[in-house]
Image: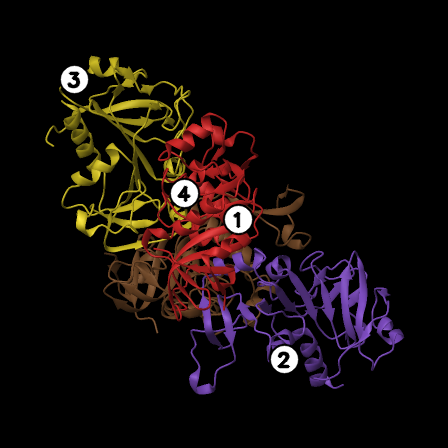
Chain colours: A brown, B red, C purple, D yellow
Amino acid sequence: MKEIIKIDDLKFHVFDGMSIMVGGFMAVGTPEFLIDELVQLGVKNLTIICNDAGFVDRGVGKLIVNGQVHKLIASHIGLNPEAGRLMSEGLMECELIPQGTLIERIRCGGSGLGGFLTPTGIGTIVEEGKKIIQSEGKDYILELPLRADLALIEGTTVDQFGNVLYTKTTRNFNPVMATATDKVIVGARKMIESIDPDCVMTPHIFVDYMIMGGQ
Amino acid sequence: MKEIIKIDDLKFHVFDGMSIMVGGFMAVGTPEFLIDELVQLGVKNLTIICNDAGFVDRGVGKLIVNGQVHKLIASHIGLNPEAGRLMSEGLMECELIPQGTLIERIRCGGSGLGGFLTPTGIGTIVEEGKKIIQSEGKDYILELPLRADLALIEGTTVDQFGNVLYTKTTRNFNPVMATATDKVIVGARKMIESIDPDCVMTPHIFVDYMIMGGQ
Amino acid sequence: MDKLQIRNFIATRVAKEFHNGDVVNLGIGLPTAVANFIPKDIKIHLQSENGLIGLGPQPNEDDIDYDITNAGGQPVTLIEGGMYFDSSTSFGIIRGGHVDVTVLGSLQVDQTGSLANWIIPGKMVPGMGGAMDLVTGAKKVIIAMTHTNNGKPKILEKCTLPLTAKNQVNLIITEMGVMEIREGKIHLLEYNPLFTFEEIQEATQATLVIDHPIKMDMEV
Amino acid sequence: MDKLQIRNFIATRVAKEFHNGDVVNLGIGLPTAVANFIPKDIKIHLQSENGLIGLGPQPNEDDIDYDITNAGGQPVTLIEGGMYFDSSTSFGIIRGGHVDVTVLGSLQVDQTGSLANWIIPGKMVPGMGGAMDLVTGAKKVIIAMTHTNNGKPKILEKCTLPLTAKNQVNLIITEMGVMEIREGKIHLLEYNPLFTFEEIQEATQATLVIDHPIKMDMEV
């Protein structure tokens, strides 16, 4: 049985300067009401790891616009012009990573691997400063694991044990991020008694807290 | 729509000297009736990649006992004494790999990665002959991808499109193996019209043929 | 041809590259339009890197489900037999060579098959998203774009902008022709009879190999 | 103590190491028996590396479902809230440090925390299965075994058999005592009062640090 906490309790789990992974792809699958609470709380100097920068008024975009993000690690920021402006004016650090490499680095961080070899980015600026390893006559970039202090996950359906289901394309980065942080908080839409054991997408052992109230 | 073939057609997809990945963990999740057909067909000099050696009368064990296996790549062979005997008498080559490394090497093979760094096996004979890479002060073994010509998968339920569901602990190596071979044949127990798109375990794009008749 | 005609002309020709059963990923912009021109007798599986296979048409206003979007963030639908998965599975599919064809636009392509489509120095950098993985992993990479950028060549001997990937492009399809990249050379396979070979070469900075190309089908 | 008493005594003591909510993986043999001795007020989640969390008791003959087995291949059950997953997820859980405790038997353990439990040279080699990943990945590694092998020490200065893993063992629990490995030394934390310190040291090839150990609870 995982602890169900109130949205007001989110403040006990966040602090200035922390790193947070946020699920979602262009805000689809992002626990919007947890982001709103972070904006309310005004925690600062955050490192945010998310597929993208969201929109100025949706997803992690709201944290960026509110000046709470010190560093953004993402695969693209094109739909949030404010993110681009802050980045080019040097007001927000931004690390751009190929999407497949980003998700795989998070998977590495969650599964105890020290890194992986990918062909993605070979011959581009992505390889700069990284170790290149040749294997079977082909060049690969050695990419390293990525972890964070906290993951904010959008669960469509949770059960009383803390198992999680994601619906449709809201799944995206959520299940992998849930494995790669010290603490995992699921913002959930709906709770049922129990999820079919064959269909659980995030096993309860990864979940620390659940907050109901997702839309 | 994937092609449904008859068990008699399996002969068109196997040949002497080929490499075959077979799903299953101590024969649970192994498509037993496809193995029986391979025994009937008598294809020889096979390289079999499977979690284990099964039993003398179950799983890939039957192929081993029948002398059809030139090389076995597995994590253990303890429940099939015949495998141990063939191995120690030099009649079957046997490569033993830690189970987590074995499944991850297959995942690498299926997902276009050139390898991964694992702490498993450091300081043991597993590291012999392999590249050791230090990262963030820790030693890792660089393990390489594994692929094969054919995968024989046990699907509990398939749909007419070729999507696959596995029940309970029959899942094990099956979904990952289905990504890492040139051809994938699913031995299925049951066909339904369509599987819930949120719950598909092996997407139809990985499946080449389905053979009904699993128990 | 006006802008819309060019777009439809290119999209129609790209759609003819697909084979029954192909898994296809279409980039945003012109490549997305290709879905509307797929021949009736060809059934392909559209993949979207945010986590689905079986991309269907855009829904009516009333049927929009904001839990199903494509990689451009637009509401879409799922066809029968389609399914959802997480980003890790999605890029396993992409990088692992399970996508047969990817179609993307580009700012520049060169005769070595390198392409540049994600950074214009001095302008805002939106990020590469999934493009680098797609062009590295897909079995066949088709660049679908206008032949020039306001008259300036985009098909070059060597890209000058930062690369998206090295040596990955197989085919370039523009309003002027269909070009294949083979052993460091660009072969003009088909040409639009509205242009002369001289005009096509003029609009191309790389030297084209022009060896009996055939006329493109002008029917859209 | 007879063989069964020793087994139950060790298993009872191991079970006291668990905390509420722990994810635990029990190896085959003696470690499997630990599940029967878990204190009533402690709820743990048993993981089985073939693909489940929430391992329940063995079913009655009539209720056996051959689609649910543990990592030893025996039919088991799943408790409420449990779930199944594939081998890749399973070893992600194991290697990623999401298993709090693993309990295994061993042929040898040494004072550096290295262990050897998969090869006896000259005998059949069954393979390491998931043991190497488990001892490398689990947060806490407990070796549960008889103190000696027919009188021959198994707790050594340095393992002589091929290693399963280097520097990974945290605790050794035998019928003679509870030993913690800390900075290259084996500390006797608890002892079985049926044995003297001399007898325990005698049965141990490594030098034990014996600094006011407490008596083990003899109730099983």
Q: CA separation, marks 2 and 3?
A: 84 Å
Q: What number of labels is visible?
A: 4
Q: Chain of mark 1?
A: B
Crowd class of label 3 (few under 14; some 14 to 19; many from 20; radius 10 Å): few
- Residue found at x 62% / y 78%: C39
Residue type at the position of mark 4: Arg
Q: Amino acid at mark 1?
A: Cys
Tell me the mark number nearer the camera, choosing from 2 and 3.
2
Residue at the disc numbered 4: D95
Q: Which mark is residue D195?
A: 3
Which image quarter: residue A82? Answer: bottom right
Image x and y of residue D214, in percent: 17, 25
Tell me the residue that label 2 is attached to. C37
* Crowding at mark 4 (Cα within 10 Å: few <14, some 14-19, many 20+): many
In this view of the protein, can residue A102 be seen by the observer? yes
Label 3 secondary element: loop
What amino acid type should be assigned to the residue bearing mark 3? Phe
SS at mark 1?
Answer: helix
Decide if residue C185 is on the left or right side of residue A193.
Answer: right
Between marks 1 and 4, how big is the CA–CA gap?
16 Å
Residue flagged by tag 2: what amino acid is it? Phe
B66, D94: nearer the viewer: B66
Marks 2 & 4 on one chain: no
Instruction: Give neighbour class at mark 1: few <14, some 14-19, many 20+ (Cα, 10 Å).
Output: many
Gap in Å between the C-alphas at discs 3 and 4? 38 Å
Q: Nearer the viewer, mark 1 or mark 2?
A: 2
Disc 1 and disc 2: Cα gap in Å?
35 Å
- Contact between marks 2 and 3 (CB within 8 A): the answer is no
Classify 10 Å Cα crowding around label 2: few (below 14), some (14-19), many (20 and above).
some
Q: Nearer the viewer, mark 2 or mark 4?
A: 2
Q: Are marks 2 and 3 on the same chain?
A: no
